[in-house]
Amino acid sequence: MSPLTPEQRDLVAANRGLVFCAVQRYRRPQDQNFDDLVQCGMLGLMDAVQHWDRRRPLAAYAAKCIYSSIAVGHRLYTRGTNSKFCPPLPAASIEFLMEQDV
């Protein structure tokens, strides 16, 4: 994801209520932390702002991106990966990290 322009940052700030609305609809009591879902939703909102076609309404496109991002984060979380929202590392990467002196 490339850095946001000041105009895009303003759009994210103005539409962050969409994220909280989506999280409230998506969240179930057994789900992960509220903050984790908000983080996934904000990433979806930033992605939506960067790829938004200005001839169409932002809210409709952003809602789809937000829900998609929350769903992906939830799938990765429930799958039991090493990190909550990162896919598992390939075996070669794990071997390389184990060889390093920390």
Image (cartoon, grey):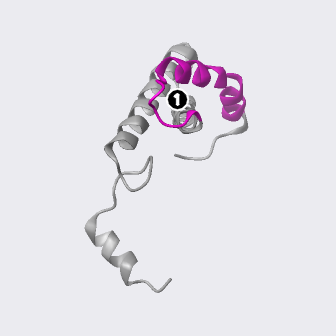
Query: At 72% from the left edge and 30% from the top edge, which residue is drawn?
Result: 10
Q: Is residue 19 left or right of residue 72?
A: right
Percent position of residue 2, x then y: 56, 47
User: Which residue is more in the foreground, 47 or 76?
Assistant: 76
Q: Does the magenta stretch include residue 38?
A: no
- Residue most extreme to the bottom: 101
- Residue most extreme to the left: 91
Label 1 residue SS: helix
Percent position of residue 98, x then y: 37, 79
Q: State the residue position of label 1.
A: 48
Query: At 35% from the left edge and 51% from the top edge, which residue is drawn?
Result: 81
Q: Is residue 46 left or right of residue 80?
A: right
Q: In this view, does 1 lie to the left or right of 20?
A: left
* Badge count: 1
Q: Is the magenta stretch mostly helix, strand or loop?
A: helix
Q: Does the magenta stretch include residue 18?
A: yes
Question: Where are the magenta residues, as a range?
Answer: 7-34
